[in-house]
Image: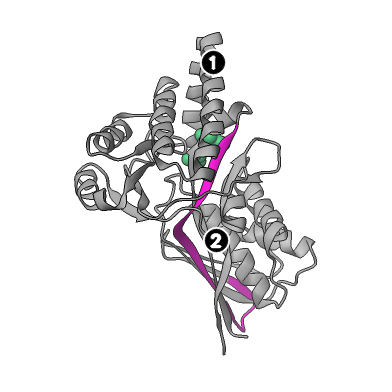
C-alpha cells in the first residue's frame, strides 16, 4: 500500500452548550464540513507532519522521543496511544487539511485527530473504527489539549447526532431533517478562548444564585423538547427552540454583538431558528431555514459574517475515502 486518505466530520452543538458544563444535557450533531488526512509510506526514519491549513510543518523520530511543537503535537500523542495498543510506528508522511475554520467551535482539531488515526491504522492494515477509533483519538486529544469534553471526538468518530451529559456515554438521537430545510453556519471570524467564556459564564451563574439555577433547568427542558422535535422532524418547533436557547445563552453572558447581529438578521429574514454555537464571544452561529429562503438569507448574512456556508447535519462519521497504490 502507498497511502490512505481518511476523513471525519466537524460538529455543531445544537443545544445546551455551557449548561453542559454544570452537568445538564446538550445535543451535538455532525456536519458536512470535514477534515481530510492523507498518510503516505516513506522510506526515511521519520514521521513527517504537514498542515497546509495551519501553515505548519515538522518531523519527529520514530521513537516519538521529541514533540512536534504546538498544534502538531496531537499527532505524536495519537502515535504514542497507538504504540501502547501494540501498533508499530513506521516512517510516513501526514498531510492534514480541514474544510472548517480553525478555533471556531466546529471541532476541526478532533476531526483531524480521528481522520489521522483511521488513516494510519488503515495504512498498517488494521483499521480502527467505532469505539476503538474514538478511544485512541480521544487519548491523543486529551494529552495534547488538556480536558476536552469528548463531544467533538465522539461526533468525528461515530457521526450522527448525540444527546450528551458529562461523565455519561452519549446516547444517539435519530434526527430526521425533512427535505426542504437546511442549516447554515456563519462564522464571525472572531477568535476567543473557550476557557475564558466558560469561566465568565460560571461566574455569572454563581452570582445569580437560584435565578441562575433556574436558567440551567430551563435550558435542560429545551434540550428535552429539542430531542423530540429532531426525532419527529418538527422544524418549526426546533427553530423556535434554537432562538429560545440563544436567549438563555445571552442571559448568562456567552453572546456578543457579532453573534446577536447574525441571530437578529436571521429572525428578521424569516429563518426558522438561529443561535450561537459552542463557546460564544465569537466563533460561529447556526441558522435553520427553508431551502427557498437560503439565497436571500445568505446574501444578507454575508454582509455581517466572515464566512457563511450551507451545510448538512447528522452525516456519517469517520471513513476511508481512498487507498493509494505505490
Ligand atoms: O466552542 P467549543 O466547541 O469549544 O464548545 C464549547 C462548549 C462549552 O459547553 C462552552 C464548553 C464545554 O466544555 O462543554
Mark 1 or 2, nearer chain start:
1
Q: Position of residue 261 (x, y in %)?
A: 26, 33
Residue 40, magenta (yes or no): yes
User: Where does the magenta region start and end?
Assistant: 25-47
Residue 70 visible? The answer is no
Element type at mark 1: helix
Q: Position of residue 116 (x, y in %)?
A: 59, 65
Assess disc 2: are there few (<14), some (14-19) or many (≥20) residues with their C-alpha within 10 Å of its C-alpha. some
Residue with the mark numbered 2: 316
Q: Nearer the viewer, residue 177 or 296?
A: 177
Q: Position of residue 58 (x, y in %)?
A: 52, 65
Q: Nearer the viewer, residue 29 or 135?
A: 29
The quadrant holding residue 59 is: bottom right
The quadrant holding residue 166 is: top right
Q: Give residue 292's mark.
A: none
Please, is residue 22 above or below residue 2 in the view?
above
The quadrant holding residue 171 is: top right
Is 60 on the left-hand or right-hand side of 306? right
Amino acid at each position: 500500500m502507498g497511502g490512505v486518505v481518511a476523513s471525519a466530520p466537524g460538529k455543531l452543538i445544537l443545544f445546551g452548550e455551557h449548561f453542559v458544563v454544570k452537568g445538564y444535557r446538550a445535543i451535538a450533531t455532525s456536519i458536512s464540513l470535514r477534515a481530510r488526512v492523507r498518510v503516505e509510506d516513506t522510506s526515511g526514519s521519520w514521521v513527517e507532519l504537514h498542515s497546509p491549513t495551519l501553515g505548519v510543518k515538522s518531523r519527529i523520530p520514530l521513537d516519538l522521543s521529541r514533540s512536534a511543537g504546538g498544534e502538531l503535537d496531537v499527532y505524536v500523542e495519537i502515535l504514542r496511544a497507538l504504540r501502547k495498543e501494540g501498533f508499530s510506528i513506521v516512517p510516513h508522511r501526514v498531510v492534514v487539511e480541514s474544510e472548517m475554520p480553525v478555533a471556531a467551535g466546529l471541532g476541526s482539531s478532533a476531526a483531524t485527530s480521528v481522520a489521522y488515526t483511521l488513516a494510519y491504522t488503515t495504512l498498517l492494515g488494521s483499521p480502527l473504527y467505532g469505539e476503538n477509533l474514538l478511544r485512541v483519538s480521544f487519548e491523543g486529544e486529551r494529552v495534547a489539549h488538556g480536558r476536552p469534553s469528548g463531544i467533538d471526538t465522539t461526533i468525528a468518530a461515530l457521526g450522527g447526532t448525540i444527546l450528551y451529559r458529562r461523565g455519561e456515554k452519549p446516547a444517539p438521537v435519530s434526527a430526521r431533517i425533512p427535505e426542504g430545510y437546511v442549516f447554515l453556519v456563519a462564522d464571525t471570524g472572531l477568535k476567543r478562548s473557550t476557557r475564558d467564556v466558560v469561566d465568565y459564564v460560571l461566574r455569572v451563574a454563581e452570582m445569580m444564585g437560584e435565578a441562575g439555577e433556574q436558567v440551567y433547568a430551563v435550558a435542560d427542558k429545551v434540550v428535552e423538547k429539542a430531542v423530540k422535535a429532531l426525532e419527529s422532524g418538527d422544524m418549526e418547533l426546533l427553530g423556535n427552540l434554537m432562538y429560545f436557547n440563544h436567549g438563555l445563552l445571552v442571559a448568562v453572558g456567552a453572546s456578543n454583538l457579532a453573534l446577536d447581529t447574525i441571530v437578529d438578521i436571521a429572525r428578521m429574514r424569516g429563518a426558522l431558528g438561529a443561535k450561537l454555537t459552542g463557546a460564544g464571544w465569537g466563533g460561529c452561529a447556526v441558522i435553520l431555514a427553508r431551502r427557498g429562503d437560503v439565497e436571500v438569507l445568505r446574501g444578507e448574512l454575508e454582509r455581517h459574517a466572515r464566512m457563511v456556508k450551507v451545510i448538512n447535519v447528522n452525516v456519517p462519521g469517520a471513513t476511508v475515502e481512498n487507498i493509494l497504490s505505490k
